[in-house]
Image: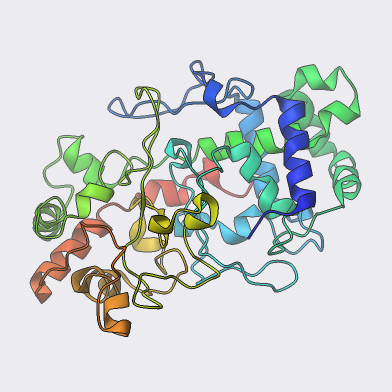
Amino acid sequence: MMNSTWLTKVVANVLLVSGLAFSQATLAGATFDWQLPNWVPEPVVPADNPMSAEKVELGRHLFYDIRLSSDGSMSCATCHVQALGFTDGRTTSPGVTGELATRNAMALGNVAYLPVLTWMNPQLTSLEIQALIPLFGEHPVEMGMAGRENELWSRLKSDQTYVGLFTAAFPEEATQGEEQLYSLSTLTKAIAAFQRTLLSFNSPYDRYKYGNDPTAISDSAKRGETLFFGHKMECYHCHGGLNFTDSVVHKRMPFPELGFHNTGLYNENEQGAYPSENPGIVEFTGEPRDQGKFRTPSLRNVAVTGPYMHDGSVDTLEDVIRSHYAVKGRGATTRGKPNPLRSELIIGFTIDDGELNDLIAFLQALTDEQFLTDDRFSNPWP
């Protein structure tokens, strides 16, 4: 559970101040240079938070700033490491108090194309709102800034770097005084703007598929591509499209597509139950059939974003394929039969060593090395 009465009030306040309205998201990024390949549509940007280079640069500084945590020990980047596809390599991440999160840190690559942002909250659709949770959330405590807003503003205002960055990013607010310039609204808008630029579309598979380069991936990866998009394994149904997930939204779509699925990872009572701390979207919908349903993650850069699944309970891609999907979901091995609520696409399959290697070679071909080292996304602080 991430919501608290206090956090709910903060969220409501930010909504009031900034006027965020997800359904009114428009093409506010139309004049921004996204540096996208021609085949990739532009992301949708909220109307009240248009993109600008100045706002992105402020957001990058904030994203990497440990002064955004109560004890100065962690920043957003602590749990979202560029070299790891903006995950952290942990099963679950500790906050400033040492309390562990209940779910695995999600990758941020191409987060601008996701209509919902977390593993199991279908109501969390705004990057601006989501930024409040690690900063101020109390269940669990992550960065521990609840009730410390004035301390946060003091830290930022006392740094001349931020005086210049905030003024350049929000010139209108700068004319209205410090209270408007240094606010939850400007802070979260800047972080969200930076996150929207974390774009990853230059993997070897992209160059093979869209760049007319038949040598960009190995023969093994090409065989893995056939398996991935074939009916034997059915991977592509949930992991298709430009971002390898069935949860996607972009400028050319009339409405978002949402994908939440029960893959049969658990079967606690042989009736499909998941562990109580991570029940899936049933926590929000109240619908029994939603037990164990989590958002489909993108597979871009998946080779560097392990451990896997919503709770980080599977260490390797080999185990994801052979010890989970191939056996109709891992829950089948612990309870003797598959989760009855699992997706109808999780039907199990046989796979030999050669096929396994080919499928993993294909998944490795989704790694965008340029994205993992691009200076535009790196830590700007000395």
Camera-nearest residue between 100 and 88: 100
Please state which of residues 237 and 278 is positioned toward the viewer in this rendering.
278
244 sits to left or right of 87: left
* Residue 196 drawn at (x, y percent): 52, 36
Q: Position of residue 46 (x, y in %)?
A: 57, 25
User: Along the horizontal axis of the image, is 171 left or right of 255?
Assistant: right
Quarter of the image for residue 66 reads bottom right
- Quarter of the image with the N terminus is bottom right
x, y percentage for residue 117?
Answer: 51, 46
Vertical order, 277 against 20 (above or below): below
- Residue drawn where x is 11% and y is 61% of the image: 220
What colour scheme governs how the chains and residues are painted in the rendered image of this protein?
A: rainbow
Q: Is residue 194 above or below residue 255?
A: below
The answer to whether 38 appears left or right of 108 in the picture is: left
Q: Residue at x 9, y 59 (%)?
A: 232
Q: With respect to residue 44, does 90 lie above or below?
A: below
Is residue 183 toward the left or the right of residue 100 in the image?
right
Residue at the image point whose x is 52% and y is 21% from the top: 29
User: Can residue 58 be seen in the rendering of this structure?
Assistant: no
x, y percentage for residue 111? 47, 42
**Residue 49 visible from this viewpoint:** yes
Q: Quadrant of residue 201?
A: top left
